[in-house]
Image (cartoon, helix red, strand yellow):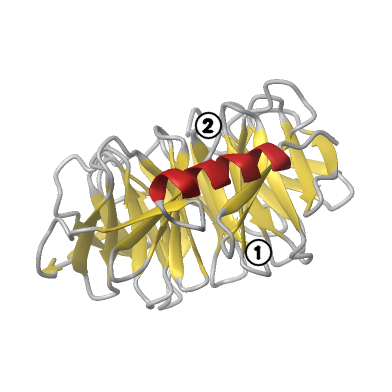
Amino acid sequence: MQSRSSFAVIVASLLALSAGCSSGSKQFQAIPASGPEIQAHGELISRGAYTFAKYSIPTARSGANRIVTGPDGALWFTEQGAAKLGRVTTTGSFKEIQMVSGTAPSHVASAYGQLWVTDANLFQINAVTPAGTITQYQAASSTRGVAGGVGERIWFTEFEAGYVSILDISTGASAEYVVPTRNALPYEVAFGGNPDQIWFTEYGASKIGRMTATGSFTQFATRSQPQSLVFGPDGALWFTETSANKIGRMTMTGTETDYALPTQHAGPVAIAAGPDGALWFTEYTASKIGRITTSGRITETPTPDAHANPVGITTGPDHHIWFVENRANAIVRLL
């Protein structure tokens, strides 16, 4: 299988010489843009059978995207339009970290005591400590999905270049593996039971791929363009099919089952395993939150704002569902 690992090591070495850092990375201290912690009073809003607590993001038009539980027990989210990384506690207290100028923070993962932030604009991946220190690592193209593995390795996708890459944070060097399918546009990643292999969506090729730590690929065709994916409590992969308006399920051997959403043109984007044994997902176009059981039963509820455009979703440290309202510029907790 074709790999760019040797090239990545050379790039890392050249960066080390130019930056004076043996890891091949650039480190600097970020200044929290919001200054002291900002307390937001949550607005309680009922929609159907659910009640939500809505917290407005301090930065207007932040372009909030993905959200994850961080190593400090707070929720961290990317602000793609404001070049910031945001933090909110379960009581609604906000802080924001200013990223490098020109950065478009995309996806975020928590691993090894840091937040790992991909960039939809610059060719890099960022490690951010809860205190706000940022370390940048060079990539070959813009980056999207990211997850922490074992042995101080970070796995991520390089969207336009068509790579799935592994970053060794002990050395700062990355190995970049070329996805076999041309124009695959690898997007999101997820770990299953084996920490030495990653599963990922191929948005451009309508496939789901699996790659081992040595760059060996297996690919399974899907019926439409998969975007976000997660492993469910049933041991299967669950993924969003944005263009087909469906939620997909795939076994480890590639058997696919699709479930059509009740709302037409709902635009499912992100999906997460919930605390209740079901899968929860965002409906960007319909401004709804969806829930699907492992048997395929779907329920939907409107978001607090009619034109919210929800994107990222996760289970928080309080065992509640949290999600991002991109257009409404808010972080929301499902009570």
Task: Answer left or right for 109 relative to 237.
Answer: left
Which sits in the foreground, 251 or 61?
61
Q: Amino acid at mark 2?
A: Ser
Task: Name, please, the residue furthest toward the right.
Answer: 253
From the image, tell me which residue sits under label 1. 149
Which sits in the foreground, 18 or 295?
18
Asked which quadrant contains residue 188, the reply is top right
Q: Can residue 83 be seen at all in this image of the molecule?
A: yes
Which sits in the foreground, 195 or 331?
195
Say if 294 sits above or below 217 in the image: below
Viewport quadrant of the C terminus: bottom left
From the image, tell me which residue sits under label 2. 141
Coordinates of residue 194 in the picture (x, y in percent):
79, 65
Coordinates of residue 45 in the picture (x, y in percent):
23, 60
Say if 46 sits above or below 302 in the image: below
Task: Answer left or right for 72 relative to 3.
Answer: left
Coordinates of residue 209 in the picture (x, y in percent):
76, 41
Q: Amino acid at mark 1?
A: Gly
Coordinates of residue 192 in the picture (x, y in percent):
73, 61
Category of crowding for the residue at label 1, using alpha-carbon neighbours closer than 10 angstroms: few (below 14), some (14–19), many (at least 20): many
Viewport quadrant of the N terminus: top right
Which sits in the foreground, 69 or 33?
33
Task: Name, please, the residue furthest toward the top.
Answer: 182
